[in-house]
Amino acid sequence: MSDEATMRWRLQNVAAYRELRRGVQRSGRENILYALIMFGFAYFMHRANEQPALVLLYAALAGGELFVGLVKWVIPSAEGLILDGLVLLAFAALNLGREYLRFQNGAPPMTTGLFLGGIMLFFAVGRFRAYAGLRKLFAERPSSEHIAWFDDLVRDILTSDPHADPLALDL
């Protein structure tokens, strides 16, 4: 590759990686909202006099979801998808396992529990697949120096005045 083609590829790679990190950070905020909803479920289970161990398990998983959301928000990276998938997989196992035990005891499984477990399992598999795709797409990740250089370049472009500086880009 020529130097111009290499530079163009590097710029595109860094821009795409920055967009990926921005998306992971945005999904971290969604994880925090989801954790609050799951804490609400745990509260309602507590109010309905469910088994205390089950309520604590839901609260612990909601705490894990909150932790994953904060990690993805503060340190956005593709690995946040793995953490997200693991917590969703644990929620799916809890819901589906609970309905399986209910069925084993002779009671019909609740549709809500089956639906929640199935949808969480579906989303967990989706997170793992998305991570595998991102690993292929970003086999060579930009270094922190490249990202800082790109951020400085964007800042210079945005703050320069094309009328006063002949080297500035007019976008």
Image (cartoon, rainbow, N blue to C red):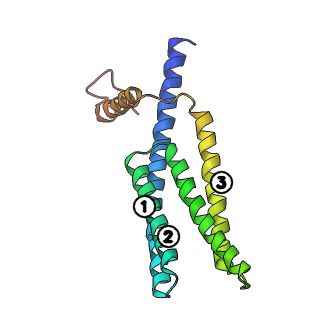
Image height of 83 relative to 41, above or below: above
- The amino acid sitting under disc 3 is Val
- Tell me the crowding category of disc 3: few under 14, some 14 to 19, or many 20 or more residues within 10 angstroms, Cα based: some
Height in image: 145 above or below 52? above
Check the picture and name the quadrant holding the N terminus: top right
Measured as percent of width and height from the top left, residue 134 is found at 59, 39
Kind of residue indicated by mark 2: Leu
Mark 2 or mark 1, which has the lower sequence index?
2
The answer to whether the residues at label 1 and label 3 have Cβ atoms under 8 Å apart is no
Kind of element beneath mark 3: helix
Left or right of residue 13: residue 147: left
What residue is pinned by disc 3?
Answer: 125
Q: Give the residue pinned by disc 2.
A: 57
Contact check, label 2 and label 3, Cβ < 8 Å: no
Q: Residue at x 60, y 59 (%)?
A: 89
Q: Position of residue 60 (x, y in %)?
A: 45, 66
Image coords of residue 107 (percent x, y) = 71, 85
- Between 19 and 122, which is closer to the camera in this rendering? 122
Which amino acid, by three-letter code, is at mark 1? Leu
